[in-house]
Image (cartoon, rainbow, N blue to C red):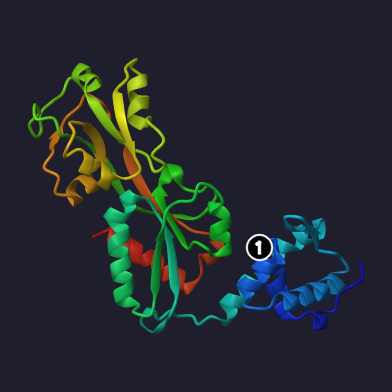
């Protein structure tokens, strides 16, 4: 390949390359860059001339990067990040900044920290917008890398591997009962525990098995889970009309006026360790640092 002269490379070409590599579509890259499709096609031609390589090959499903494009993509992304940090102000002023924050979290996190986070953020940054999203079934790491999601809150065991994570708080579980036979603080035998009906929270609503069931299986026992729902608010509401046992985090038990008895079981209960995760390219970004510190301050109150 011929030697490249840096004077022949337009920074906008590298921005276009980065968008094409992440979107795998000329049309989507044009939309992302707020340019017309012919303009992006023309810039792709200039990129091919500059690098003496096709870079992207058209298929029926979009464009596919060549090995040369795969090789330079991480370096281009790193270069653009460094340039962005070079041009960005050292300090971030939330009160005067207009921006959108996209945070991914579960129903549990919405009721325990994300609602307060959204309120405080909008108070401190009146020009901001906040979007709270459910955790996608797949592609989360890619969405963090592309900036479609800024932060992911989750239990540490569910955090995306190999990404930076900041500890926020720990939460324990408590067993709630809508059965009239139990008083608050009453002990329950393991036999009775396994006989009664249970409700269970799974974000997909499609599972009837969790850590409690693993603990029971280790001693050769099984409980009777008859209801699986995607969120704790729904579970607590349904318990008002049906007798159930349910394990919920302590912060959830305290956030709702449910009136159910807290019963003690012979099981050793698991706990949650809530963390915030992000893509490493955002670690030094002043706005992102402010978002993380805001979360930590809320978690510690």
The quarter of the picture where residue 111 lies is bottom left
Q: Position of residue 39 (x, y in %)?
A: 74, 79
- Viewer-side residue, 101 vs 269: 101
Is 72 rendered above or below residue 46?
Answer: above
The quarter of the picture where residue 129 lies is bottom left
Q: Is residue 232 visible?
A: yes
Residue at x-position 41% and y-position 36%: 206
Q: Is residue 140 left or right of residue 225?
A: right
Q: Where is residue 124 in the image (x, y as percent from the top left)?
A: 31, 76
Instruction: Sort mark 1 into few (<14), some (14-19) or many (20+) by Cα contacts within 10 Å.
Output: some
Q: In this view, does 11 lie to the left or right of 102?
A: right
Residue at x-position 32% and y-position 55%: 110
Counting every numbered tag in the picture gives: 1
Q: Considering the numbered disc 1 on the image, is that residue within a helix, a strand or a loop?
A: helix
Q: In this view, does 261 lie to the left or right of 21?
A: left
- Viewer-side residue, 209 vs 237: 237
Quadrant location, the N terminus: bottom right
Residue at x-position 75% and y-position 81%: 10
Q: Where is residue 281 in the image (x, y as percent from the top left)?
A: 56, 64
Q: Is residue 170 left or right of residue 63?
A: left
The residue under label 1 is 23
Is 67 rendered above or below residue 172?
Answer: below
Residue at x-position 72% and y-position 69%: 17
């Amino acid at each position: 390949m011929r030697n490249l002269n840096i004077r022949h490379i337009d920074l906008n070409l590298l921005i276009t390359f980065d968008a094409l590599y992440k979107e795998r579509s000329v049309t989507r890259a044009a939309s992302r860059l707020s340019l017309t499709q012919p303009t992006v096609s023309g810039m792709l031609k200039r990129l091919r001339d500059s690098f003496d390589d096709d870079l992207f090959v058209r298929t029926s499903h979009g464009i596919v990067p060549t090995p040369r494009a795969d090789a330079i993509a991480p370096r281009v992304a790193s270069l653009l990040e460094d340039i962005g940090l070079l041009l960005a102000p050292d300090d971030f002023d939330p009160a005067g900044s207009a921006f959108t924050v996209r945070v991914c979290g579960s129903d549990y996190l919405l009721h325990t920290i994300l609602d307060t986070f959204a309120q405080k953020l909008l108070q401190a940054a009146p020009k901001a917008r906040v979007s709270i999203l459910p955790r996608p079934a797949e592609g989360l790491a890619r969405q963090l890398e592309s900036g479609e999601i800024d932060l992911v809150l989750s239990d540490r065991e569910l955090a995306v591997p190999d990404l930076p994570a900041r500890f926020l708080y720990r939460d324990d579980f408590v067993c709630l009962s809508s059965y009239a036979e139990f008083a608050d603080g009453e002990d329950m035998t393991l036999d009775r525990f396994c006989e009664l009906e249970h409700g269970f929270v799974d974000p997909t609503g499609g599972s009837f098995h969790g850590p409690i069931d693993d603990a029971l299986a280790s001693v050769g026992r099984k409980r009777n889970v008859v209801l699986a729902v995607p969120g704790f608010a729904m579970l607590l509401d349904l318990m008002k009309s049906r007798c159930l046992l349910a394990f919920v985090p302590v912060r959830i038990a305290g956030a709702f006026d449910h009136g159910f008895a807290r019963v003690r079981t012979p099981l050793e209960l698991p706990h949650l360790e809530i963390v915030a995760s992000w893509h490493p390219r955002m670690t030094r970004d002043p706005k992102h640092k402010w978002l993380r510190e805001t979360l930590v301050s809320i978690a510690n109150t």
